[in-house]
Amino acid sequence: MKSIHEIIIEVDKLVPIPQVMNQILAIAEDPDSTMSDIAEVIIYDPIITSSLIKACNSAYYALPRKVNSVKEAIMLLGLNQVIDFVLIKTFSAYMGKEHLGYGLNEGELWRYSVSTALMARDLAERKHASNKQFIFTASLLKDIGKIILDRFVSGAIEEIDDLILSNNYSFREAEEEVIGLDHAELGGIIAEHWNFSPEMTYVIRNHHMTDLSALEDYATSVVYLAEIAAMMTGIGSGTDGLAYRFYESVLEGLEITEDDLQETIALASEHYYDVMQLLSIT
Amino acid sequence: MQIIIGPAQMHIENTRDVILASTSLGSGVGLAAYDPDANIGGILHFLLPSSANNKYRAKKNPFLFADTGISAFLEQMYQHGVRSHGLKLVAAGASHNLNQGTPYDMAQRNCLAVKSILAGLKLTTAYEDFGGSFYRILRIQNGYIYVEVPGHGEKKV
């Protein structure tokens, strides 16, 4: 298909992610990471360092004394929160723009991704997952394919809508049918292009359960469910809406009850406003 | 000026020079109320049907839930001088994923909750728009309530 060739050319033209991001992603995926590991990476990036210190010194934390270094910031916020902060800040450059093919104004794809990541964090903590940081990161990055597919969805939205309304397609299935490639598959291609780990690439590629064997994969299941919960809140939503398939077996597999899901939505929505407030001051 | 009402939030305002709009409504429900005599409008955007198992969180933020949110919202509307007999009410939202059925269909329960709570208060809606797998936005502007489905037009009430 002509458009697939055009899409792959766009992937090749994509600005590479900064080296520091690959280092942080590696730290995020390693449960044995230490405070020093992350500090050593961040101190060489002046923009991230200044944002982090500014956040710590904001009224949001109301500290009795000033924070002046990355190490102090990590001691204050904790390792995971610092990694979350750095990932959210950095990927806003890619996901913070408008993506009008999906009906998303400036910042909306990014807000949707942050909301999904917060849902995923809560679900992972609720289930005492050992790879919480990996799950958070995968949730944040899962829709990276939309940044390129956006232009192609824009020219195909009427056909896509038609398939959804008349033929009971999901939005992802309709993307695949009309364009030849869906945003999850394209996200997997971008993840490979950026040298993400095979595990991260797998979750991004299957976050809508394209390959049904992903229903058996723990991290993919949590990311999938987190996105369902994020869709339910409507935060940063687009024209794809909630037109994705719901697999009840994911909840059963993760042993998430309806009460758990409601609690996650409640907690993560509350936390979302806190995170947005914090990010707006940095 | 436009004021945006996010999930688990509500806002009441004199709408002479102000537009009130919800963020996109997912499986939650938006309830818009407008009194044309007082020119007071308000939008509540709740996410969950019942606070029964979550009293602590409802106390912290009643607008998260249908039961605590609707009563707190209407109470504040009345405090702004609004009278129930002249109140125009529009409810929208409760969208769901494809194949989403019980016991996880919170949209359906949100929809039933708003209907039953309003019925219990002897209030009727001028317009309701629920269901489907797309988002809606509620807006109060220039004396009217709008239900917009982005990309697919809007209904003026």
Image (tube, rainbow, N blue to C red):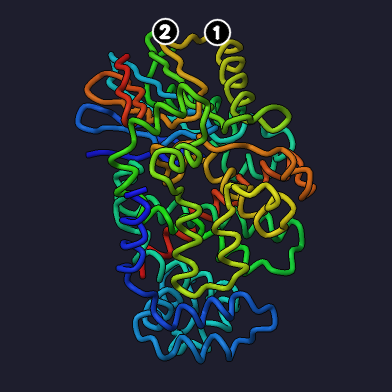
Left or right relative to A108: residue B142: left
In the rendered image, the residue lying farthest to the left is: B17
Q: Which residue is mark 1?
A: B122
SS under mark 2: helix
Residue shown at the point (30%, 57%) measured from the top left:
A97
Q: Report the chain holding disc 1.
A: B
Left or right relative to A188: residue B155: left
Identify which amino acid the numbered label 2 is placed on: His
Picture coordinates of residue A133, whole percent (x, y)? 62, 69
In the rendered image, the residue lying farthest to the front is: A1
Whether discs 1 and 2 lie on one chain: the answer is yes
The answer to whether residue A29 is above or below residue A111 is: below
Name which quarter of the figure residue A158 lies in.
top left
Q: Mark 1 and mark 2 in contact? Answer it, CB < 8 Å.
A: no
Q: Quadrant of the C terminus of chain A?
A: bottom left
Number of numbered callouts drawn: 2
The answer to whether residue B43 is above or below residue A152 is: above
Report crowding for label 2: few under 14, some 14 to 19, many 20 or more residues within 10 A (C-alpha): few
Residue A273 in view (yes/no): no
Q: Which residue is mark 2?
A: B85
